[in-house]
């Protein structure tokens, strides 16, 4: 099952659990139980379809790529901490540590866009063609 299918599966299960746990006991009647069973059967069919689509998919499981680097100030050359580094478009992101280092895992194939953002620095967008190199990214301080 691929990661996307797993996320959908867990969301559906979570919603199903919340829905059944929040159903008021005092409202249970014969027709309510019949309706609940109908919705549970529909949910089971949907969940089964999601699970099976992950197994039957023609797409191979994604290869994980690791993108690592250091972010420094263009002015001082010192590491910049708490920079949000993200693969765009996408959900893969990381914050730099005190040494300005980051590491991102992604299944996206190159080329892709890497974005670096910090309140005190200009936003940087750069194209990435090779994930095997450790990057050194220089951010320009914002002019006040």
Image: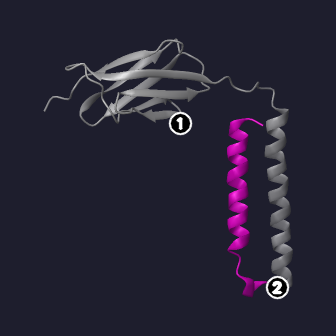
Q: In this rendering, is residue 35 above or below 54?
A: below
Give the side of residue 93 with respect to residue 118, left or right.
right
Q: Nearer the viewer, mark 2 or mark 1?
A: 1
Q: Residue at x 85, y 69 (%)?
A: 37
Residue 107 quadrant: top right
Q: Residue at x 76, y 26 (%)?
A: 59
- Which sits earlier in the primary sequence, circle 2 or circle 1? 2
Identify the mark at residue 91; answer none if there is no mark.
1
Residue 137 quadrant: top left
Give the side of residue 7 with respect to residue 124, left or right.
right
Label 2 to label 1: alpha-carbon separation: 44 Å
Identify the mark at residue 15; answer none if there is no mark.
none
Residue beneath disc 2: 29
The kind of secondary structure the magenta stretch mainly shows is helix
Which colouring convention does the figure follow?
one colour
Q: Residue at x 74, y 70 (%)?
A: 20
Residue 17 quadrant: bottom right
Split into 4 quadrants, where in the image is the N terminus? top right
Picture coordinates of residue 98 (x, y %)?
34, 33
137 in the magenta segment: no
Picture coordinates of residue 85 (x, y %)?
42, 30
- Residue sitting nearer the eye, 126 or 63: 63
Around disc 2, counting alpha carbons within 10 Å, would you say few (fewer than 14), some (14 to 19), or many (20 or more)?
few
Picture coordinates of residue 2 (x, y %)?
73, 35
Q: Are marks 2 and 1 in contact (CB under 8 Å)?
A: no
Q: Which residues are magenta?
A: 1-28
**Disc 1 element:** loop
Q: In this rendering, is residue 138 above or below 83?
A: above
13 in the magenta segment: yes
The extreme bottom residue here reads: 26
């Amino acid at each position: 099952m691929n990661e996307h299918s797993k996320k959908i599966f867990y969301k559906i299960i979570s919603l199903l659990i919340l829905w059944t746990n929040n159903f008021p006991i005092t409202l249970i009647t014969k027709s309510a139980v019949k309706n609940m069973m109908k919705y549970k059967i529909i949910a089971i069919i949907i969940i089964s379809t999601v699970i099976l689509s992950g197994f039957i998919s023609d797409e191979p499981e994604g290869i994980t790529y690791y993108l690592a680097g250091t972010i420094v100030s263009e002015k001082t050359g010192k590491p910049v901490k708490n920079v949000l580094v993200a693969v765009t478009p996408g959900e893969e992101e990381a914050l730099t540590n005190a040494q300005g280092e980051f590491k991102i895992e992604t299944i996206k194939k190159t080329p892709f866009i890497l974005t670096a953002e910090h309140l005190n620095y200009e936003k940087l967008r750069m194209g990435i063609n090779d994930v095997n190199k450790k990057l050194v990214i220089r951010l320009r301080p914002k002019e006040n």
